[in-house]
Image: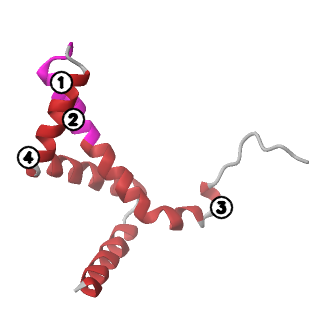
Amino acid sequence: MYFIQYIVSRFFIFLLLLLPEKLRFKFGDFLGNLTYKLIKSRRMTALMNLKMAFPEKSDEEIEKIARKSFRIMIKAFLCSLWFDKYLKNPKNIKIINQVKF
């Protein structure tokens, strides 16, 4: 059973890597919005936590923050899927403030 899950997840990652980076992030936004809508328990937890953390914010502001946090979390997860491939390209690495000995 786990082998099938592994194959499906590897296939998903393969398909994701075929897309340009900007499109991957757009896909992450889409999945974040979808997750916000479909997983009610997590949405309600996020909204309650935000209301406790920011009692001065309106319900609209709280919802906007919650939606954005869902999108950011999904994009962060998706980035972890292509991170090793990203680091293999020297163009993507920039070293700043390097001290020479």
**Residue 51's disc number:** 1
Q: Which mark is residue 40?
A: 4
At x 44%, y 64%, the residue is: 82
Q: Which mark sits nearer the N-terminus, 4 or 3?
A: 4
Q: Quadrant of residue 88?
A: bottom right
Q: CA distance from mark 2 to mark 3?
A: 35 Å
Secondary structure found at label 2: helix
Residue of label 3: 90
Q: Are marks 3 and 1 in contact (CB under 8 Å)?
A: no
Provide the secondary structure element on which disc 3 rests.
helix
Residue beneath the point at 91% across and 48% down: 101
Determine crowd level at label 1: few under 14, some 14-19, many 20+ residues with C-alpha closer than 10 A: some
Magenta residue span: 56-69
Where is 51 relative to 4, above or below? above
Residue highlighted by disc 2: 66
Q: Earlier in the sequence, mark 2 or mark 3?
A: 2
Disc 4 crowd rating (10 Å Cα; few below 14, some 14-19, many 20+) is few
Lower position in the chain sequence, tag 4 or tag 1: 4
Alpha carbons under labels 4 and 1: distance apart: 16 Å
Q: Residues within 10 Å of mark 3 (few under 14, many from 20)?
A: few
Residue in the picture at 34% in, 78% down: 10
Q: Label 4, secondary structure: give it.
A: helix
Which badge, 2 or 1, is on the more N-terminal residue? 1
Residue type at mark 3: give it. Answer: Pro
* Viewer-closest of 59 and 45: 45
**Place of residue 67 in the rendered image (x, y in percent of width and height, measured from the top left):** 21, 38
Of marks 2 and 3, the one in the foreground: 2
Numbered label tally: 4
Task: Return the disc, 4 or 2, that comes first in the chain's sequence.
Answer: 4
Q: Nearer the viewer, residue 50 or 78?
A: 50
Q: Amino acid at mark 2?
A: Ala
Mark 1 residue type: Lys
